[in-house]
Image: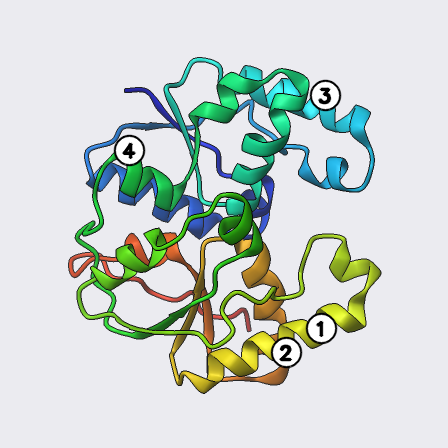
Amino acid sequence: MRVALFVTCLNDALFPATGVATVKLLERLGVSVDFPTAQSCCGQPHFNTGYRGAAEKLVQHTARAFADYDHVVTPSGSCAAMVREQYPRWGETSLASRTHELTEFLVDILKVTDVGAYFPHTVTYHPSCHGLRTLRLGSRPHRLLQAVKGLELRELPGAEECCGFGGTFAVKNAAVSTAMGQDKIRSALATRAEVLCAADNSCLMHLGGLIRRQDEPLRPLHIAEILGSTEEDPYRPEEPAS
């Protein structure tokens, strides 16, 4: 089976550790992962803001970049949702059917929930809107986290509420976006967890900014980095720049 990583532009530019963790995790499970260097943006920002012509060019480019693979795995629910839900508008049904968000690929394709991870911390999980309502990831992320050695999973109050990011929504409606994010952070703090986990770095970017500005004792972290951590090679947080 030929598997490609669709790292997404947000992860590539701002959260490269998520892409590295995804590859390490999949290789640990016996999957050989390719990284097509021609990949670019999936076109979601353009599509959502009405630039359909520009989106179409990116859709066609992305389809060509991943044409030769049986499965395309992405650590981004929002980008997976874009490919699955919108690419068929332009006739790209093949890529839509071959694209999987990471937790889907692990549970549905590899048929695993215990990936051999070790993460001795308390964690609460935020389900992103795309993962919750479009991809319908359901219990997959929870089942994976519950199988991690040393991890204590704490339920997030109001988990199904949006974090307030919403792409350009956060720019156009900054006050509302910030208020929604603060509500989500208060809920996460109420669990007394050390880590706020999600399967979308777009949500974590928004929440992480608020957490840092408010100096809260909570670390935002992508699920791939938790699942990629082992006793032999444990997760090590990056030190903030001085």
Residue, disc 4: 109
**For the residue labelled by badge 3, is the local secondary structure a helix, a strand or a loop?**
helix
Q: Tell me: 149 left or right of 200.
A: left
Looking at the rendered structure, the kind of residue marked 4 is Ile
Q: Position of residue 200 (x, y in %)?
A: 51, 53
Image disc number at residue 57: 3
The residue shown at (48%, 48%) is 16
Q: Secondary structure at mark 1?
A: helix
Q: Quadrant of the N terminus?
A: top left
Q: Nearer the viewer, mark 4 or mark 1?
A: 4
Q: Which residue is mark 2?
A: 182
Instruction: Give amino acid for label 3.
Output: Lys
Q: Quadrant of the C terminus?
A: bottom right
Instruction: Examine the rendered structure and indicate whether residue 142 appears above or below residue 217.
Output: above
Label 3 or label 2, whichever comes before in sequence order: 3
Three-letter code for the amino acid on which mark 2 is drawn: Gln
Q: CA distance from mark 3 to mark 2?
A: 37 Å
**Looking at the picture, does residue 35 appear above or below residue 203?**
above
Q: Is residue 64 above or below residue 132?
A: above
Q: Is residue 36 among what the camera can see? A: no
Query: Which circle, 3 or 2, is nearer the viewer?
Result: 2
Mark 1, residue position: 178
Q: Are marks 1 and 2 in contact (CB under 8 Å)?
A: yes
Residue 182 visible here: yes
51 or 4: nearer the eye?
Answer: 51
